[in-house]
Amino acid sequence: MQFSDIVIAVVVVIIAYFLGTFPSAELVAKRFGRDITKVGSGNPGASNVIRELGWKAGMTVFLADMAKAAIAVGIAWAVSGEQRGPLAYAALCGAVAGHVAPVMRKFHGGKGVASAGGALFVLFPEVSLVMFVSWFIISKLTRKASVASLAITIATPIGMLIDDAEPWELYVVLGLVAFVIVKHIPNIRRLRSKTEPSL
């Protein structure tokens, strides 16, 4: 890899990170006169918006969070010419990192499920669509966003495997799966104690 290629890759990942920091939840909540980081769980993500402001507002945030990561991976695809190349996955990780740990908000962000799903829409559109519909159905049935998020997070690598993902692609996504599960440990504890808020 030439030095210029490395510079381009770094620039793409930085762009992906800052796209990931786009404050979808805060902007939507602000239209309702609310600070989403100070109500409910305080998490600036779609689930907290659904609980506090309703499904319409929450799904707007969910789709916006998907879109920002999809754009990031799309840029990587356009630059590298590879839909599922290393740069695309680097952009995926950059966008999720930006969503979860936005530097402008003291690294306090969401949990990465919607943004990862948006990136996956570019990489594995059929799998992403199935996971999106599954999240909606499971969250409606259980009324627990965390249950739906954990379910599709665990199912995603299986869907990729069925869709002929390369081993290295699975390793990257399995790393993200582990990261998302760790971010959901407080939710898992609340589920076990039956104190997890319902949608």
Image (cartoon, grey):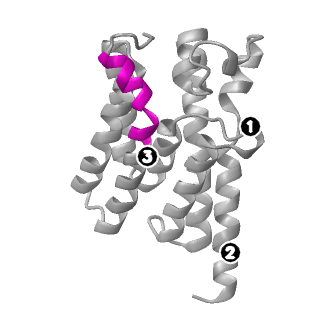
Give the magenta range: 180-192
First in residue order: circle 1 vs circle 3: 1
- Which residue is label 3 attached to? 179
For label 1, the residue is: 105
Q: Is residue 119 visible?
A: yes
Q: What whole-number distance in Å separates the C-alpha atoms at marks 1 and 3?
A: 20 Å
Indicate the secondary structure of the residue bearing disc 2.
Answer: helix
User: Residue 28, labelled with which disc?
Assistant: none
- Depth order, front residue of 191/54: 191
Q: Residue at x 32, y 21 (%)?
A: 138
Q: Amino acid at mark 2?
A: Ile
Considering only order in the chain, which callout, 3 or 2, is on the residue closer to the N terminus? 2
The reply to whether dot 1 and dot 3 touch (C-beta < 8 Å) is no
Residue that mark 2 sits on = 8
Toward the viewer: 143 or 31?
143
For the residues labelled 1 and 2, the Cα–Cα distance comes to 26 Å
Q: Quick one: SS at disc 1?
A: helix
Q: Amino acid at mark 1?
A: Arg
Foreground of the two, 42 or 14? 42
The span from disc 2 to disc 3 (Cα, nearest Å) is 27 Å
Q: Is residue 171 magenta?
A: no
Q: Is residue 40 above or below residue 3?
A: above
